[in-house]
Image (spheres, rainbow, N blue to C red):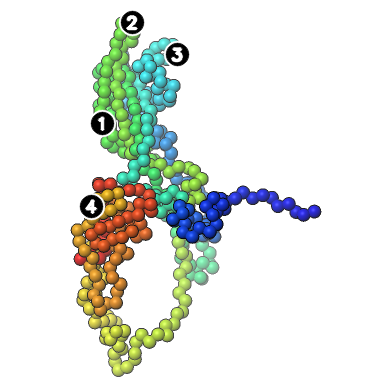
Amino acid sequence: MAKIKKPRPKNQKEILDEALGYNTADPSSAGRPVIEDHNRGNDVSTKGDRVKDISIGIMDIDTAIVKYIEEKIQPSTIQDSNRIKVPVMYGYPERWATIQEKGYLREFSGRMIAPIIVLKRDSLEANRNLGTKIDANKPQNLFAFESGYTKKNTYDNFTALTNRIPVKEFRLVVMPEYVTLKYSAVIFTNHLEQNNKIIEAFQYAANTYWGEQGRFQFRANISSFATSTEYSAGDDRTTRTNFEITLNGYIIPDTVNRDISHPKKFLSKAQLVFNLETDVSDIFTVGGGKKKGVKGQAVNFPTSGQLINANVDPAITNYLNTNSTKQGTPISTNTVTFVGSFLQPPASSGLPPTNKNSFNYFINGQYSPTLSVISFDGTTLVFDTSILQFTLISTDEILAIGKWQ
């Protein structure tokens, strides 16, 4: 009886082959994403590591705000000649709906809860002005930090004999996704004087970094406070203040696609080995006391520690040493203009002419690879926004560093 093979699920490449065709000549023109083969031999295992993966979620940001209010701002008020601590509650949907409907919160016994602070998250919006990881499937911007200890540095006599140096273990963390979060908060007190004290504490802490000491911290700002006193016959009197907290945060989700998109750690080289190489080309011609170099330039070989003195054209030296910076002005979503021109190498140098590959490009402090540049003639720089994964705006800072005249 023939052996029945167990069915295997198709991978992403096979699914794309069936959907887009097997013989796609130009993947970029057909809208077909480039899938690189992953070499698992280059991966370093993280099994048994004591260093935890870094992840920052929305819940961490919510917790950081509540902890900061409770431990740093420490809102309090005077009631019945006693100083009491004002509790902070998160407004989950049912609780917030009660506040919107009745204007206050009550206990099960019917007593109004005051003083109290209630806050909830309203929105989350991406912030592209601080930077981006370029591509979530294969991040280009990664942070590397060195671990204090690695098991690879176990000492033995064999290591000393083979002239191995201790290796360094580095951890890689993807650039976070920068976001702007907005929170609505409400302060409930019995009297206006109590409300004023709490407002003063929040205003003093505005435009600073909120969070737990030694953990994640995020910049928070409060623009305004709206206070109202509500009173009706036969009902409780309450003073209510509404305000909005705008927080600049960042998230690194604990998801599968983040873990498989880039290696988590790598090790430095423990040993550098040079092999013997022989150059059989006729670079120098032996004769007399001097040797003649390539292109007729005379080279004086040193004796007793003297430096080599070569007759190099000063124009070539000036060209090679030039590395200046100019800032451009964005005029459209992918075009930037500069005031300047290329510095071309001397004709006798044999160096290639100056072009877009002679420059390094930075957008808001983030390096942009030359692959993202379509053309650059010294005055007009055109980016490929499909590679950048974002478009330019008028406030962006675009720098070009290289051979400027």
Determine the secondary structure under disc 1.
strand
- 2 or 4: tag closer to the N-terminus: 2
- Identify the residue position indicated by label 1 in the image: 223
The percent coordinates of residue 91 (x first, y second) are: 40, 25
Determine the secondary structure under disc 2.
loop
- 4 or 1: tag closer to the N-terminus: 1
- Tell me what residue is drawn at x 26 percent, y 54 percent: 336
Whether the residues at callouts 2 and 1 have beta carbons within 8 Å, the answer is: no
- Tell me what residue is drawn at x 25 percent, y 47 percent: 394
- Tell me what residue is drawn at x 33 percent, y 58 percent: 373
How busy is the neighbourhood of tag 2: few (under 14 within 10 Å), some, or many (20 plus)? few
Q: Which of the 4 quarters of the picture holds residue 21? A: bottom right
- Identify the residue position indicated by label 4 in the image: 329
**Amino acid identity at mark 4:** Thr
- 2 or 1: tag closer to the N-terminus: 1
- Identify the residue position indicated by label 3 in the image: 108
Which mark is nearer the camera, 2 or 3?
2
Nearer to me, 45 or 138: 138
Whether the residues at callouts 3 and 1 have beta carbons within 8 Å, the answer is: no
- Calculate the distance from the C-alpha at mark 4 to the C-alpha at mark 1: 31 Å
Residue found at the far right of this picture:
1
- Identify the residue position indicated by label 2 in the image: 234
- Calculate the distance from the C-alpha at mark 2 to the C-alpha at mark 3: 19 Å
Which mark is nearer the camera, 2 or 4?
4
Nearer to me, 153 or 12: 12
